Image (spheres, grey):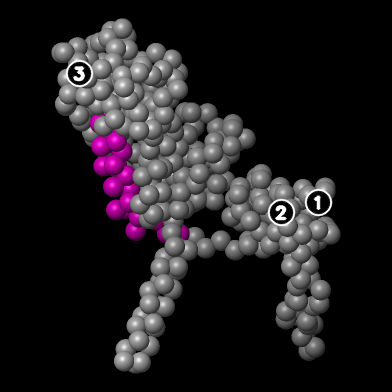
Amino acid sequence: MKLTKTIGCILLALALGSAETFAQERSRVAVLDFEFASIQRWWEGNWDIGSGIADMIVEELVNDGTYSVIERTRLDAILAEQDFSNSDRANPLSAAAIGRILGVDAIVIGSVTQFGMEREGRSVGGLGRLTRGLVNRVGQQRGKAAVQLTARMVNTDSAEILVAGEGEGRSDRSGLLLAAGGGTPLGWASLSMTSSNYRETIMGEATEAAVEQLTGQLVRSSGRITARVVRVSGLVADVDGATLVLNVGSAVGVKVGDTLRILRVTRTITDPATGAILREITQELGQLRIDEVDAGSSLGTVITGSGIQVGDQVRN
């Protein structure tokens, strides 16, 4: 009995160790807003369906757990800082450059190729024509919706397209066309595509089906991406209160949001025969969070510790 329990504990430990190793080796990916310039805008307001669909894909990937996915807020901050235009983002070379700044292994770019709806034989967005007045009516009605998406997963080191996938979703039933629960009209400009209000509509049902199909293809292709193990080692170049400037940046894998240790060398051990440094004895002073990154430097905020000086080391 004791032997059986011992073997069971060993197997459990191995399983937990394997799970931890897998989690650490997950490929890091980011999802850019989908391009939808080819879709005829049949809705009022500035509803950004490309951003909404990207949010839905991120949600699906996070729930699946195969990839480590960059938060959309971090991605938006980097894009604003680097001033990449929408047309640049759809280009694999530009997308790869964005991915390198983020420190991800791959980046997803895509397009909405169909986003249409039909009621009583009149439709919009690739299914025919429908007046805006009709689109804004709500209620339990018979309707059809169709959504088609295409996407490419781009290697951030080589700009090689690793995966080309597509998703298609259709809904044909009686239900809410463009309404929230209880039939309350929703303004398209403020409608979140990840909300239950949207998903309960016929249009939302078709969008969700297309997103799930596309995301499934991205997940099944995870073996084509090699997760990089990044070792960051640099020095503090400037100290201004709790703000530090480091001499390492995105070129060596530093990313916005990273937490790095701050160390000070207290003793150096050298080879008595050659004078070569054998080992450095260090003292940990604290930690910092990376807030801004460019190719050769980064800026961070001290979150623990004090007394940090120029020349102190930083490591992940």
**Residue 119 lies in the magenta stretch:** no
Question: Nearest the camera: 277 or 71?
Answer: 71
- View extreme (front): residue: 182
Q: Amino acid at mark 1?
A: Asp
When asked about the image quadrant of residue 34, the answer is: top left
Q: Nearer the viewer, mark 3 or mark 2?
A: 3
Task: Pick whichever of labels 1 and 3 is earlier in the sequence.
Answer: 3
| Mark identifier at residue 238 | 1
Task: Pick whichever of labels 3 and 2 is earlier in the sequence.
Answer: 3
Quadrant position of the C terminus in the picture: bottom right
Task: Pick whichever of labels 2 and 1 is earlier in the sequence.
Answer: 1
Spatial CA span between label 2 and label 1: 16 Å
Which residue occupies 58% across, 39% down? Answer: 78
Instruction: Measuring from the top left, give residue 162's x and y in whole percent.
Output: 36, 49
Q: Residues within 10 Å of mark 1 (few under 14, many from 20)?
A: some
Question: Nearest the camera: 158 or 73?
Answer: 73
Q: Are marks 3 and 2 in contact (CB under 8 Å)?
A: no
Quadrant position of the N terminus in the picture: bottom left
> Would you name the residue on which mark 3 appears?
141
